[in-house]
Amino acid sequence: MTIRCALGVMLLVPVLAWGQSSDTAHADTVPVAAVHADSVRSDSVRPPRARADSTVGDTIFRTAQRLAAEGRGDSARALVAQKLDSAPPGSAAYVDALYWRAVVAATAADAERDLRTIIVTYPASARSADALMRLAQLELARGDRDQAVAHLQRIVVEHPDSPNRPRAAFWVARTLLDEGNLPTGCARLADASRLTPAGEVELANQISYLQQRCQGVDTSATAAATAQAPSRAASSAPTAAAAPKAAGATAAHGRYTVQVAAFSTLASANGLRDALVARGYPARVVGTAKPFRVRVGRYATRAEADAAARAMREKKLTAYVTSAETP
């Protein structure tokens, strides 16, 4: 099995557990990821314990799952649309419905739109980590492993309470190991082991198996490099004139901005802002209460913002275009 297929399998598994019943074991799938469904079945991968989720007992969403699995996607989407229309915008029920609309979406583009809306507009939602997991799966399906790993890393960093976090950390580690980056991969694998609850026996076994590749690997240099990263970034920061062109071409009162992340603590947001500024990006922290959003630049047109986001993604940064806040 290729790493791409394997990663698709493992990313899909946690999602299958949400709202799962005996008649919907493989129902919770995004159409674009259907190429992975046979792999899930043939590998007999068992899902981890179902998370505590308010939608588990929601008859409408479970019915939509079953309809989608039976090939009745239009009916599934109609049910979810009713739920979305009846929920107060911005409420937990609304974000849940938005997420499930992505789950039963007819196209990858439709699914991605709703998932990105969740992580950009509702980053503090309980569904944000779930949306990042599915976005990672979508990126993998289109062959962009770097972006998939970027989404997984966001789960690890930004969602400390998410049940997805241990598995996301594991797959970041596995990808690094498969790319030959043993010191960093082994360090991340140790993180995954530390994050994995005692009850996640299958994941713990997978981590233990991979740790055989880490015998004798010195990860101390990786830890030291991580600790020294802010000072190195500051010392090597480009001048304002040398700042990335797409990020620097901003308007003082632009309608659009590029969001990089959202954090539950101000300290974390300030840390990322400082690192971005050190790299020459006009970054700022938005918000006086969580979520604290880290954004870059202001742009007069959507095209300019899209160009800035593309330039940042080329440098392996997470970047999404959204409406700028009032100065």
Image (cartoon, rainbow, N blue to C red):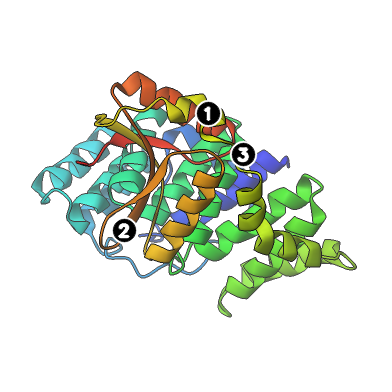
Q: In the displayed structure, would residue 42 be above or below residue 92?
A: above
Q: Is residue 24 visible?
A: no
Q: Is residue 234 left or right of residue 311?
A: right
How far is mark 1 from mark 3, CA to CA? Answer: 29 Å
Residue at numbered disc 1 = 241
323 relative to 263 in the view: left or right: left
Relative to 193, say whether 110 is above or below: above
Image quadrant holding the C terminus, namely top left
The crowding category of the residue bearing disc 1, from other C-alpha atoms within 10 Å (few below 14, some 14 to 19, many at least 20), is few
Between marks 2 and 3, how big is the CA–CA gap?
25 Å
**From the image, which quarter does the N terminus lie in?**
top right
Q: Going 83% across and 64% down the picture, which residue do you hit?
A: 214
Neighbour tally class for label 2: few under 14, some 14-19, many 20 plus, Cα within 10 Å? some
Residue 283, given in percent of the width and then of the height, sits at: 42, 43
**Which residue is the site of mark 3?**
146
Would you say the residues marked 2 and 1 are in contact, meaning their CB atoms lie under 8 Å apart? no
**Mark 2 is on which residue type?**
Pro
Picture coordinates of residue 44, whole percent (x, y): 62, 55
In the picture shown, does residue 10 fall above or below 323? below
Residue 74 % position (x, y) = 25, 32
Numbered label attached to residue 203 = none
- Say whether disc 2 or disc 3 marks the residue closer to the N-terminus: 3
Give the amino acid type for the residue marked by disc 3 in the picture: Asp
Residue 291's tag is 2
Q: Quadrant of residue 92?
A: bottom left
Q: In this rendering, does residue 318 appear at all?
A: yes
Left-right relation of 171 to 263: right
Please name the amino acid that badge 1 sits on.
Ala
Q: Which badge, 2 or 1, is on the more N-terminal residue?
A: 1
> Measuring 66% from the left and 39% from the top, which residue is drawn there?
4
Write the residue at 79% across / 67% down. 220
Label 1, secondary structure: give it: helix
